[in-house]
Image (tube, coloured by chain):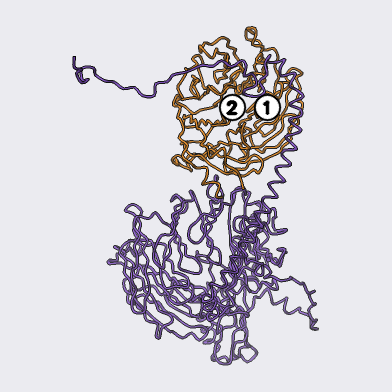
Chain colours: A orange, B purple
Amino acid sequence: FSQLSQLNQIMKPICLLGHMRSITQVRFNRDGDLIFTCAKDPHPSIWFALNGERLGSLVGHNGAVWCVDCRWDSEKVLTGSADNSAKLWDTETGKCVLSVDTNSAVRSCGFDFAGTSAMLTTDKTMGYKCTILLYDIRQDPAGQPACQMLVPESKITSAVWGPLSRFLITGHENGDLCQMDVRAQKVIRTEKHHKGAINDIRMYKDGTMFVTASKDHTARLIDSYELQLFKTYKTERPVNSADISPLRPHVLLGGGQEAQDVTTSGAHVGKFDAKFFHTVYEEEFARVKGHFGPINSVGFTPDGRGFVTGGEDGFVRLHSFDNDYFDFEFE
Amino acid sequence: LLGDILAEKPQEKKAINNALVLSGLPIVDSARIERLQVFIRDKFLDKHGEVVKFSMPTDENGNSLGFALCCFQTDQQALDALTDIQGASLDKMHTLNVFKFSDFNRLADADDEWKPPEKAPFVDRGDLRSWLREDRCHDQFGVLHTAGSVATIYWHWPGDPQPVDSATRNNWTESRLHWSPLGTYLATYHTKGIALWGGEKFEQINRFQHKNVQIIDFSPCERYLVTFSPSVTKEDPHAIKMFEVDTGKMKRSFLHEQAAKWPVFKWSHKGEFFARVQTGKALQVFETPSFSLLDKKSISVQDVQDLSWSPTDNILAYWIAETDNQPARVILMTMPEKREVATKMLFNVADCRMHWHPQGNYLCVRVNRYTKKKLDADNTPKYINIYTNFEVFRMREKNIPVEKIEVTDAVSCFTWEPHGSKFAMVQGIASKGLSVVFYQVNAHDIEKVKVLEKRNVNTISWSPIGQHVVLAGLRSANGGLEFIDTSDMKTTANQEHFGATDIEWDPTGRYVVTTVSFWHVKVDNASHVYSSHGTLLYKLNKLERICQFAWRPRPPTLLSDEQIKNIKKNMKTYSRRFEKEDLQSSTRASKELLEKRARLNTEYEKWRAKLLEKFRGEKQKRLELRGVDTDELDSNAQDFVEETLEFPIKVERIRIDKLPQVAE
């Protein structure tokens, strides 16, 4: 366990203080110079990754913003909110160019590979079933989705586009993982690798594999084509978010505790850590402390030279790795 | 209702279970029969309850026949009496032989022909101590995890514990794991009773039936098992049962009347005797293997409160509460001779607690004393201004001298140092700050050697071989761990295991394990393993929801003190050999680890290669969808536009009129 001490070097993070409520998602654009953060307050923010300076915030939503995505060319931003709407924004100006209303809160959203379609998933509430909606954003859809698909059983808790956007990969509340062909309205494949709700799914840079973060205290590495489980990373607490490094064989996990255990664990100062695992050996080798509450969203910078974490405490912390990190090897 | 009325119908069975037959009585003539009856009732029967019916049959001349019949009001009273007076002696020639009337028919119908009992087949249990002969003398430990549904026994190879073959079992126990005192057996709890497991493969050794058993105790020699279950029925009213481990037979069972702390029956160090207190009345000392009262009678002691055996000698210590005209007393008595070897009078006593030194060298009696005593409305005593005295009995010295220490603060967690002569306790109250105080028992006095102030400690855990101690703040006290070497009273390490609920030293005193048990806290369940000096060695956190971590105990060493001294003298030569072995095994381990990692890497690369093939195959499609190559961050470098940004790093304000004047 000597590896632990090596990596707890002083990496001074930049703290982005823009949200009054807990962070729900943090995302980078493809180039890695912009950071998108959304939280339980109605105004998602865009920041410069270079120095943490805020570009601006997106004003328009009336409720918590659950998800955010940036198009591959960085020109457009997509957000989904608990105010039963999803909005498309212009990144440079922050102007809302399109808004669609849904029947219930929008839980996940994402641009497809080409950037011409947007997918939304909505929550199961008030008589409305969990639904996947696809919109063609080249034309103003006037509120009508190009196609939609109902999800009958366990609701979707996280969703991403599969390789070449042929299908969606969805994670469900009961731990199921599915490939959904929305246009053909069918479930291509279902696998049950997790025992608890899947809180987050993040694609590897080439889309061939992804990592899932689950309430069952594990994160798993799975291939996108056949949903075959390859690696499992075990922790002692529910995992809220995970990401795969584009540069080194490392996986980053962020988690917390069950809501009902919050009072018992107490406000343990600065003790919520981001955990680093070796992708292949499944061993934890480092932890970075700093958050005052559970970590809700994590992400590596697209060049793999840093990472960002967003927590229940409303803080977003942007870290840059020291030189030691790039030389660090397991014996 | 008809049902109720029928239930009230006198049942024949009922009448029989509360009747006893007393035989072995002297035969007396009609003149003295009245006196005999009164004597029997007075001495043996009345104290157990109300005797509803008593009859001493006579022959045609009015002489007694040597037996009597009595009926108690309740079955319980009859059983109570039976337990107490069976085997009691009336005089030199007569011993009471008591049995239940319900047994009478059974005994009367017994076969006249004696049939020899069937020979039980020999079961080879194998070597029950095989674990002690492991190559490097590693210990084993048991872990109950996955919320109690899986139990696994591990070899403690430091840094890399390995589960023992075939020793990971689902639902092995229904509540907890319990090792026998010398480590030979693992006891598991079930609704039907207890099961014992042992041997190299942890096969089942024996089963002991006791429905809904809740808690157990072993005799120190592991020959006997005592079980307690709160589920008592009319047919089986005995809450406490004693079994012989080897045969599985129940040797004796007892009713459990008053509320008491477990274990109710305390064992002498070799398992020759076990005893319990009948609060306020008597000491009951039983002997094995007969399981009957020593000398066939209880030791009547007025106002006796509690007893405790020496861990190394057949000496029983007990204390008597103070009464209006007699001070409290602590008495030490040898068994089976029942000779008093020490007595101490104590004045103004509210309460006493006895703490034996683990090697029996000292007995410390903690006495709560008061300055004033008041009587409540219902005559219960209320004590004002309690302070504590510690009376230390020096057991190994002639006439067992007693020395006193006085402490005014509130006291808790008194512990002796094993194999040493120190003791430690926590003094003070939480709101004002707790201190841990160490004392040393010297040849002629007891010295306060160290006071450690402002310590949030609620557990003092000594190494089983002495010298090292851990001061821990378990459960609600944040899991602080202070490791101290008491030879120079220096703190060797300060650690923290947040939320730790239990702490346990291994039987050799090399490792300390703290655990956050799922039974108390639902998150972060893990066990941390530290060296005796407090270095964190590794964490056992890959197992889910750990409930219990328990080291397997070891039997005491077979080496004599002389041999141990020699080994310590020649430590250097032994060390050299062990260091060489350690080096070899660590390179072996790292070689194994390297091989394992190389294997994992090859597998991973193969998997990735297949995925990359698919990825490359889709390249054309990707170009079509986006119009540019975005496979790498710099794939379309030719489209990059170079931009120079300027950021002010520092802004400084200078007042112009303060600039030095330039000569014109």
**As drawn, B344 above or below B31:** above
Q: Which residue is mark 2?
A: A302
Disc 1 residue type (three-letter): Asp
Q: Which residue is mark 1?
A: A206
Q: What is the CA distance from the residue labelled 2 to the residue labelled 1?
A: 11 Å
Q: Nearer the viewer, residue B356 or B544?
A: B544
* A50 left or right of A165 in image: left
Q: Find numbered disc 2 in the image and state the secondary structure of the residue it sits on.
A: loop
Disc 2 residue type (three-letter): Pro
Residue B50 at least partly seen: no
* Residue B68 image-quadrant placement: bottom right
Q: Find numbered disc 1 in the image and state the secondary structure of the residue it sits on.
A: loop
**As drawn, A209 above or below B56:** above
Tell me where residue B120 appears, x and y as whole percent: 78, 75
Q: Nearer the viewer, residue A98 or B606?
A: B606
**Label 2 CA crowd tier, 10 Å (few <14, some 14–19, many 20+):** some
* B434 left or right of B162 in image: left
